[in-house]
Image: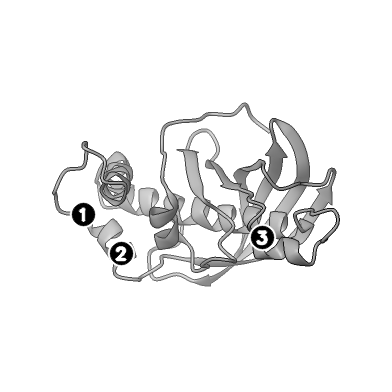
């Protein structure tokens, strides 16, 4: 995987909820830390793992461990967010607009949700307004080929690194990795199938 590139698009959980359909407890992405389109569309996201998660009640009571299937789900949701952001920025480019305007609209919306003093009362970019009105640009169903390398325990931050590596007809392939404190815990590939696409397909 390419070196980490962080900090250029930081979004909290309320904006994340506009980009994916899942909700807690099955929302496996708390934040987006970075998104780049060149040279390969890539996202950095993550989730804070708390001992208060309901999953630890049965997995396992005497030695709580984060279910590996949930790490896989987090990577899949990150791939969906990557797809949505890529579709939005490419749609803006195709409309001869600056894709950065879409990202800045998301940043400003995030500032509003956090009551940040930098929030500005301006109209949302039309593509972001569609998200807020419940029109998710895409949904992605995936097949996975992942290797689970180490267990994940409560009290850590699970970081996701997903790259869009190619299109094959109606399928899209992603390289995916989840890590804790820089140590990979899950690594492999995801293959997504386009299942809903109101915006132009990229």
Position of residue 136 in the picture relative to residue 33 (left or right): left
Q: Which residue is mark 2?
A: 132
Image disc number at residue 124: 1
As helix, strand or loop, the secondary structure at mark 2 comes to helix
Number of numbered labels in the structure image:
3
Tell me residue 97's x, y (percent).
24, 45
3D distance between C-alphas at marks 3 and 2: 23 Å
Location of residue 111 by image quarter? top left
Residue positioned 63% across, 55% down in the render: 74
Image disc number at residue 77: none
As helix, strand or loop, the secondary structure at mark 3 comes to helix
Residue positioned 48% across, 44% down in the render: 32
44 and 199: which is toward the camera: 44
Location of residue 137 by image quarter? bottom left
Q: Is residue 32 above or below residue 8?
A: below
- Judge whether residue 143 can be spotted in this image: no
Circle 1: is it few (<14), some (14-19), or many (20+) Cα within 10 Å? some
Q: Which residue is mark 3?
A: 73
Tell me residue 66's x, y (percent).
75, 54
Circle 2: is it few (<14), some (14-19), or many (20+) Cα within 10 Å? some
201 and 196: which is toward the camera: 196
Check the image and name the residue furthest to the top.
3
Q: Is residue 32 above or below residue 16?
A: above
Circle 3: is it few (<14), some (14-19), or many (20+) Cα within 10 Å? some
Tell me residue 199's x, y (percent).
38, 65
Residue positioned 80% across, 62% down in the render: 59
Q: How is the image coloured?
A: one colour
As helix, strand or loop, the secondary structure at mark 1 comes to loop
Foreground mark, 3 or 1, reads 3
3D distance between C-alphas at marks 2 and 1: 9 Å
179 and 177: which is toward the camera: 179
């Amino acid at each position: 995987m390419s070196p980490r590139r962080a900090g250029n698009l930081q979004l909290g959980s309320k904006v994340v909820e506009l980009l994916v359909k899942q909700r807690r407890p099955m929302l496996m992405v708390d934040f987006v830390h970075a998104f780049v389109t060149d040279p390969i569309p890539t996202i950095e996201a993550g989730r804070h793992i708390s001992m208060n998660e309901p999953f630890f009640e049965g997995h396992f009571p005497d030695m709580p461990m984060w279910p590996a299937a949930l790490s896989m789900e987090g990577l899949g949701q990150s791939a969906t967010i990557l797809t949505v952001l890529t579709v939005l920025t490419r749609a803006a480019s195709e409309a001869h607009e600056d894709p950065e305007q879409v990202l800045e609209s998301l940043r400003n919306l995030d500032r509003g949700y956090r009551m940040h003093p930098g929030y500005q009362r301006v109209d949302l970019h039309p593509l972001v307004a569609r998200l807020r009105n419940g029109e998710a640009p895409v949904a992605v169903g995936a097949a996975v080929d992942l290797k689970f390398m180490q267990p994940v325990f409560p009290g850590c931050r699970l970081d996701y690194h997903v790259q869009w590596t190619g299109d094959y007809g109606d399928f899209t392939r992603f390289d995916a990795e989840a890590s804790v404190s820089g140590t990979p815990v899950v690594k492999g590939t995801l293959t997504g199938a386009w299942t809903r696409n109101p915006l132009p397909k990229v």
